[in-house]
């Protein structure tokens, strides 16, 4: 009896231990099967492309299911699946606010999707340098028509290349332009017109505020909202080249040309231009307030045209556009804008030599080629980095045309102020500091100093 | 012979738990301590660079670290006091077997079984500055001057977060303390009753001293729970632990250093500091409390 009990005890222990080893083994299972696939197909990568072998491809964009851009993505994915019936796409797209964390985690665990969106710059620089991204130079050279479709400069932008890391690390996908959406009905009611200068904007905002409307809604709780305003103001105050000067440390964030811009934000905040407690409003609420006519203007990107002017928007017919105002005493920077090559598509280096590589190449060309980008242009989701022959036909929306006109006449452009910075946390820190300024936790001088401190801390 | 056989059986039964603990707790802990002496950007395949104690020096020189420690202090004091006193009070009420006791037992315990993330999102909506339930209610009952940005106003936001954390876990400790209170022999209450002791005397002279062991364990558990609180603060602050780091806590800073700053070495150093702090605090509290219990 005792021996039976002992035997049962031993079997239970062995079963638990084996199952635990099985669980830890699972993490390697995918890798080992991929390795086997690599081994078995390494001699057959040059074989016919119309393979019937089942292939799973992981794909991720930074659009949530509810985002209008997702509709265009779904159309292209359906087309791809029809053209490649042996390929199963695992769509891991998620909203922009979650995507950055997801991307970071995947980089750290070497589990990047096969084809994925990113914004280049300091956020993924470490991953590029560690060899996690596939160099797309060969793909471009093997497809000259596809390569030549890109606008001049698009393939060498800071979102897809690095000066000290030779190679093509992404395909340009989306250019964005920022500007103001405004509610024409509210403006008419209050008797104001779109401002051209910052000084005019303050006057307009005061009148809107007196009428009981939030003049300029800002979802300050989501740091990127106020950081975009800071970036745009910096380019109007200093020119778009300030981003490179800050990254090269030629200029510090605590220098007068940066602190003055923080003071402008302080002034706008104190005048009530952003409404009460802007740091407690998130981006979803910001859009909600604009769509429900509670605010006169909203500084955003062309990618949100569909949100505000689509069929589901209650104010679709009342939405107008004006370019970001300039400083009266700085007319030389009037056409320096926040905009440019934004999101790009990259391929994980893990696909190299596997049967997924050719399909990843096809998918990236599908999305960043003329036909694919047309789908996004149709819904006013982006300014394409390629020259589309039927651009006039596709762009029927007047506001989209105005955004494009702003982009075309820009004398200088840059995206986020930290685009060129080598410290990977600068973007997050800048956003945090801007929200702190909005929330009256920091003064303009303290904001600049905090950013310089972040640079110092990361030097060590 | 039999005790030797029993010992072998004990080892066999303990082996799976020991293995799990070693693989998933002990090994990562040792690896984190090891990494705290290196500079690493967290990317697989990237080189590790030995930097000695530089990571620790950087952490101690970081203003945000000291803010997180200050917040942790507030979290611990306010969290322990609120959880223990309210749990004890509720446990005592439940022990009186009043009408509706079963219903209230379930109600108090409900937040514990819900996902912390889901509860955090719920509170985020309730406390929304513009359209949240709380501010709307205050405005409607004529107390609009009390309405504020609960999650971003620097004077109250962190306290609000602490109280939400307490609200979630009070039920759990109530049940633990209830089990202790109802195990106190009824004769003690009867004799106190016969001597004319009131409720307060009964609680402070009998119930509290006899429950001190369990209260001590609850304090240690609350401390451990607070030391590792992350998801609640992350969700309520939309991942920023702000505005401007105002709600930063040590575990949040570990996340920031590792996944935002790509400084896994500093993140690991911070993890080591938090581990030492947690062990020290728990040990001090536990022995102090048990010393008091023994004296009682």
Image: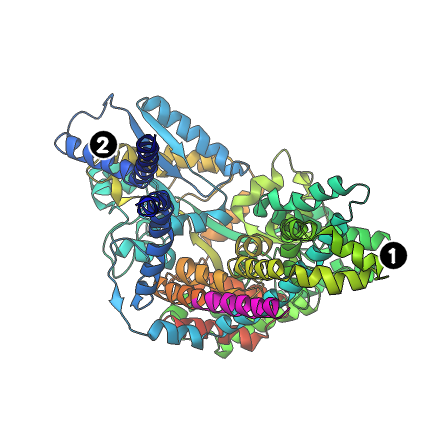
Q: Which residue is drawn at 28% across and 24% down?
A: A54
Magenta range is B276-296
- SS at badge 2: loop
Q: Mark 1 lies on which chain?
A: B
Magenta stretch, overall SS: helix
Residue A128 horizontal/vertical position (percent):
29, 53
Judging depth in this view, the residue of A280 and B254 nearest the camera is: B254
Disc 2 target residue: A355
Q: What element carries label 1?
A: loop
For the residues carrying marks 1 and 2, which lies nearer the camera in this image? 1
Disc 1 and disc 2 on one polypeptide chain: no
Chosen colour scheme: rainbow
Instruction: Tell me the subunit letter for badge 2.
Output: A
Residue ID at (76%, 43%): B101
Q: Quadrant of the N terminus of chain B?
A: top left
Residue labelled with disc 1:
B142
Q: Which of A14 and B186 is in front in this view?
A: B186
Question: Where residue B273 appears, x then y in whole percent?
Answer: 42, 68
């Amino acid at each position: 009896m005792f021996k039976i009990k002992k035997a049962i005890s031993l079997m239970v222990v062995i079963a638990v231990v084996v199952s635990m080893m099985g669980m830890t083994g699972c993490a390697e299972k995918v890798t080992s099967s991929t390795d086997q696939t690599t081994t078995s197909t390494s001699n057959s990568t040059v074989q016919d492309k119309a393979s019937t072998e089942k292939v799973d491809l992981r794909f991720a964009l930074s659009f949530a299911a509810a985002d209008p851009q997702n509709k265009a993505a779904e159309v292209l994915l359906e087309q791809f699946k029809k053209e490649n019936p042996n390929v199963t796409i695992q769509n891991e797209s998620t909203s922009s606010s979650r995507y950055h964390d997801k991307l970071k985690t995947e980089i750290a665990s070497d589990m990047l999707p096969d084809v994925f969106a990113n914004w280049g710059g300091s956020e993924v620089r470490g991953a590029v340098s560690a060899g996690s991204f596939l160099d797309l130079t060969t793909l471009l050279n093997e497809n000259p028509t596809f390569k030549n479709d890109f606008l001049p400069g698009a393939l060498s932008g800071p979102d897809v290349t690095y000066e000290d890391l030779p190679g093509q690390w992404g395909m340009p996908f989306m250019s964005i332009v920022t500007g103001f959406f405004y509610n024409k009905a509210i403006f008419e009611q209050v008797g104001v017109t779109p401002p051209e200068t910052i000084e005019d904007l303050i006057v307009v905002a005061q009148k809107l505020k007196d009428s009981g409307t939030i003049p300029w809604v800002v979802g300050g709780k989501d740091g990127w909202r106020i950081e975009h305003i800071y970036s745009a103001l910096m380019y109007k105050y200093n020119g778009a080249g300030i981003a490179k000067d800050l990254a090269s440390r030629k200029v510090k964030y605590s220098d007068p040309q940066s602190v003055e811009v923080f003071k402008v934000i302080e002034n706008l905040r104190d005048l009530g231009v952003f409404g009460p407690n802007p740091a407690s409003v998130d981006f979803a609420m910001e859009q909600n307030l604009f769509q429900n006519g509670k605010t006169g203007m909203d500084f955003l990107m062309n990618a949100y045209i569909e949100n505000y002017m689509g069929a589901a928007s209650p104010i679709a017919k009342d939405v107008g556009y004006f370019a970001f105002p300039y400083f009266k005493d700085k007319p030389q920077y009037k056409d320096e804008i926040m905009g440019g090559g934004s999101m790009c598509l990259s391929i994980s280096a893990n696909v190299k030599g596997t049967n997924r590589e050719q399909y990843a190449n096809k998918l990236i060309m599908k999305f960043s080629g003329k036909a694919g980008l047309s789908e996004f242009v149709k819904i006013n989701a982006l300014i394409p980095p390629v020259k589309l022959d039927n651009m006039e036909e596709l762009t029927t929306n007047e506001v989209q045309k105005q955004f494009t006109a702003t982009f075309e006449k820009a004398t200088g452009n840059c995206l986020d102020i930290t685009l060129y910075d080598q410290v990977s946390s600068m973007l997050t820190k800048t956003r945090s500091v801007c929200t702190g300024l909005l929330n009256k936790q920091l003064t303009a001088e303290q904001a600049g100093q905090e950013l310089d401190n972040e640079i110092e801390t990361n030097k060590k | 012979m039999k005790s030797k056989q029993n010992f072998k059986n004990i080892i066999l039964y303990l082996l799976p738990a020991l293995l799990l603990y070693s693989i998933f707790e002990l090994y990562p802990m040792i690896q984190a301590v090891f990494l705290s002496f290196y500079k690493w950007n967290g990317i697989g395949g990237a080189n590790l660079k030995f930097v000695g104690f530089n990571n620790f020096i950087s952490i101690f020189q970081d203003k945000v670290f000291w803010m997180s420690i200050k917040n942790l202090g507030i979290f611990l004091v306010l969290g322990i006091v609120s959880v223990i006193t309210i749990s004890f009070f509720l446990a005592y009420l439940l022990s009186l077997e009043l009408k509706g006791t079963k219903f209230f037992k379930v109600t108090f315990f409900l937040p514990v079984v819900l996902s912390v993330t889901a509860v955090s999102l719920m509170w985020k909506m309730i406390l929304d500055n513009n359209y949240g339930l709380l501010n709307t209610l205050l405005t409607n009952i004529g107390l609009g001057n009390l309405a504020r940005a609960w999650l971003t106003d620097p004077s109250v936001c962190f306290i609000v977060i602490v109280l939400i954390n307490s609200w979630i876990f009070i039920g759990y400790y109530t049940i633990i303390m209830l089990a202790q209170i109802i195990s106190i022999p009824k004769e003690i209450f009867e004799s106190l009753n016969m001597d004319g002791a009131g409720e307060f005397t009964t609680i402070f002279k009998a119930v509290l001293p006899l429950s001190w062991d369990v209260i001590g364990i609850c304090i240690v558990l609350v401390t451990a729970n607070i030391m590792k609180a992350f998801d609640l603060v992350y969700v309520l602050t939309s991942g920023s632990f702000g505005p401007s780091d105002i709600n930063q806590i040590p575990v949040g800073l570990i996340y920031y250093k590792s996944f935002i700053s790509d400084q896994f070495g500093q993140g690991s150093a911070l993890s080591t500091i938090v581990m030492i702090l947690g062990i020290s605090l728990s040990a001090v509290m536990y022995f102090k409390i048990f010393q008091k219990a023994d004296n009682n």
